[in-house]
Amino acid sequence: MILAQASWETKGKDMKLTKFRVQDYRCINDSGWVELDDIAVIVGKNESGKTSLLKALWKLNPFRHEPYKIDREFPTGRRKEKSIEKTVVTAEFSLSTDEIEKIGAIHESAKGVTGIEVKKNYKGTTSFTFLPNQLSNKRRDIPWVVNQIDEQLSEPLALSFFTDHFKSQYRSEFKRLREEVANGGGSKRAMEMCHELNNKLQSYCNPQNWQNPNPHHQDLSALPKLSTILNDTKALIEKTPLSEAVDFIHSWLPTFVYMDDYRIFNGSAQLDEILERKKKNDLQDEDETVMLIMEMAGLNLEEEVKKGGQEDREQRALDMNDASQTLTNEIADRWSQKRYEVKFNADGQHFITFVKDIGQKGLVSLEERSKGFQWFFSFDMTLMYETKGKFENAVILLDEPGLHLHAAAQRDLLKRLKAYAGKNQLIYSTHLPFMIDFTRLDNIFVCEEKESEGTKVHKDWATADKDARFTLQAALGLSWSQSLFVGQFNLVVEGVTDYWFLATISTMLKDAGEIGIDEQLVITPAGGASRVAYIGTILHAQELKVAVLLDSDKEGDDAYKQLVHQWILKERLVLRVGEILGAQGNRTLEDLFDDDYYVKFAEVAYAKELGGKKLNLPSRPQLSLPERVGEAMKEAGVADFNKGRVAKRIMEDLAKKKLADLPSPTAEQFKKVIVAVNGIIASWRKK
């Protein structure tokens, strides 16, 4: 088995975190499930529970052991419920095709395993459940072994030929063994516990007393049978196929890397003083940073302290140069986005670290670099160290990254985070508008503290508190303002949902090899039909090429009159959804979707309010689809209908689909709109 494990670990591990849930941790009673693809963004105000969420998850499998501390981390005000058995994190992981094949090759009973559920409690016990759960009905899996243990090892507790003294001591050990098998999936520790328990049996025998002249002999006479059962149990655990699978699964778990701020850097340090503080277990943050960098460069603190008192300066200079090149090469090979050159210098116990961007002439000590540079560099160092130089197969948890960066640098950081997620998974929290990527609507979660429920994590922006909404609204506003005046060709649409739909369907068309919206077109959501004329006027005044797309309804009519009748834009530059579709009555971009498809997500978005009721659309063709859904909502007892809630659900679904998955009319309708938009751009180019 050891040889098999060694050969398997030569290839990269592709186990991915698909969702997680935090319970009974600090301000979190139950976070709810948080789903994860490559990136998840947690938005919320300060003190909303974002840090608690990330720290709880980090302790599931950190690079260095970091236990849960029940006295400090269990929610206050619930003292009677406090227990080390309480689960803190439940996480589900999917396995790659390669991993599924390897697990299935262990034994027949392991075939069909596609994922794993991992739980960790305050005690530090990690338990595994193979997915799908129906695998447990196969013989010789862990639940079956636990059942055998219950039948065999619990027997002495019911037999009269053991004394009460023996039973009382045996009972607690039996319980510990059973829990280890159940939670550890038949771990090697469980086999060791069987052996240890067998050795302890004789010490449980009752000593002589006046009530029973020979109780000690009574217990001793029953020991051989129990000893045999324990040996059989040990063999049973050892031969259980899925216990081997647990060993492999555990070794495949990704490392969780947590960072809440940049490391404190001192470009210069006295090595002998660091060593002295290390011996006293009194290391400072900057000491640990120096030691981390030295270790990755192949330098040993104790050895360098010795060399500091030696006379051979030439050899030491050569060593420093070699270490400098070693770390520089490590970074250059693993990270192409930002390339650094590291230079070490040592004089006696005085150790200096310089870092500069490759291509720059001067060397600058670490503490003299900008806070932004220190953040980038320190995170690279941390990630490289905790992934053993691989920069991959980790779950990266960043708490409020970019706080020390100016707005433009935050945008650069956002791009870089996407690159970090290429070979890892990334979860970061923020309340900074510039750290929100509105091209990824599907991965934004709101974190807020509810008075009676504790911290909750969800995707329902409409019900979020004002602080969380402000971050999202501000991000949208910034995205809007940044898009103005920079495009060669500009299209103003009424709202952000129009932008989402057009951009997403366009991408799906291009992915399918068809024509999407022209790459040079900048789409700007105006924030309502009433503002379309205002934004269009501003753009036109700047002598930019601009067109607008309006819904065919009253608000769209009013905007059309302002733009065309006041000679702001030529009529051909003002597109109407109804005219493009050749349809009478009110029409919006939502009308491009199939009725049944849109209604399905309206029911999902308002599931709580509807309470299981189905929507029956009225037969009123003069109304737009959102208007008909609004009437159906009123008929079902829902007074206020917000089409933005439905749009969010549709966007989440579209993020998982290809063009071929959409109802045929939907794709064709969007094509008509895109053809009309591209037609205007083509006419501009001719001029």
Image (spheres, helix red, strand yellow):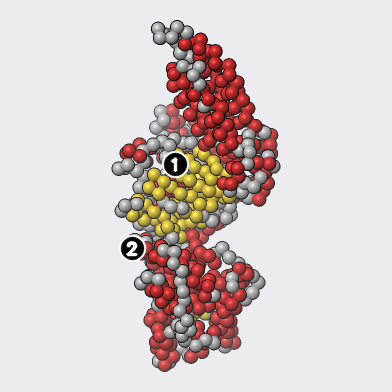
One can see residue 568 in this view? no
Relative vertical location of residue 625 with respect to residue 90 in this rendering, above or below: below
Question: In the drawing, what numbered circle is on residue 558?
Answer: none
From what the image shows, is residue 313 above or below residue 365?
A: above
Q: Position of residue 687 (x, y in %)?
A: 57, 88
Vertical placement of residue 206 versus 18, above or below: above
- Quadrant where the N terminus sits is top right
In the depicted view, which residue is nearer to us: 422 or 501?
A: 501
Q: Position of residue 235 (x, y in %)?
A: 63, 27
Amino acid on which disc 2 is placed: Lys
**Which of pointers 1 and 2 indicates the residue nearer the eye?**
1
Residue for badge 2: 466
Between marks 1 and 2, how big is the CA–CA gap? Answer: 32 Å
Q: Is residue 187 left or right of residue 165?
A: right
Q: Tell me the SS state at disc 2.
A: helix
Of callouts 1 and 2, the N-terminal one: 1
Q: Are marks 1 and 2 in contact (CB under 8 Å)?
A: no
Q: Which residue is mark 1?
A: 87
The residue under the point 68% across, 36% down is: 4
